[in-house]
Amino acid sequence: MVEESTALTGMRAICDYVNRSEPTVLSWIRELDFPAKKISGIWESDRRLIDEWRRAQVAGRAPEFQQRLNPEQEFGLPESSSFLR
């Protein structure tokens, strides 16, 4: 038995999968940590990751998707760093 790929390549394929417009999906990517990324100029995602993201959104428990590090933590800078201020 051959496993079907779960990869989604291109914004159109991603939008079709979630049945939403491109502006909506781009908003989700920016604001809700929707699991899609532009790689070498082509949007990529995965059905399983999207399904997991949707379940977390519906359940109201999306900390693993919405919890973002502050810049100091993300780049390993001391919290008192004035580098980004």
Image (cartoon, rainbow, N blue to C red):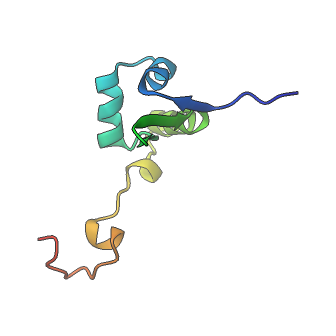
Q: Percent from the top left, x then y, of residue 19?
A: 45, 17
Q: Name the foreground residue: 74 vs 5.
A: 5
Judge left or right: residue 65 versus residue 24.
right
**Residue 7: x and y, percent?**
60, 33
- Seen from the viewer's position, the closer of residues 40 and 25 is 40
How many tags in the picture?
0
Quadrant location of the C terminus in the rendered image: bottom left
Image point (51%, 21%), residue name: 17
Quadrant of residue 43 within the rendered picture: top left
> In percent of the image, x 16 and y 76: which residue is there?
83
Measuring from the top left, give residue 81's x and y in whole percent: 19, 81
User: Does residue 46 appear left or right of residue 20 in this picture?
Assistant: right
Quadrant assignment for the N terminus: top right
Image location (x, y in percent) of residue 34? 42, 39
Question: Residue at 47% of width from left, 17% of height from top?
Answer: 16
Looking at the image, the residue that sits furthest to the left is 85
Q: Front-most of 24 and 55?
A: 24
Between residue 24 and residue 67, name the one nearer to us: 24
Residue extending farthest to the front is 40
Q: Answer with left or right where residue 45 lies relative to residue 31.
A: right
For residue 12, what is the image quadrant? top left
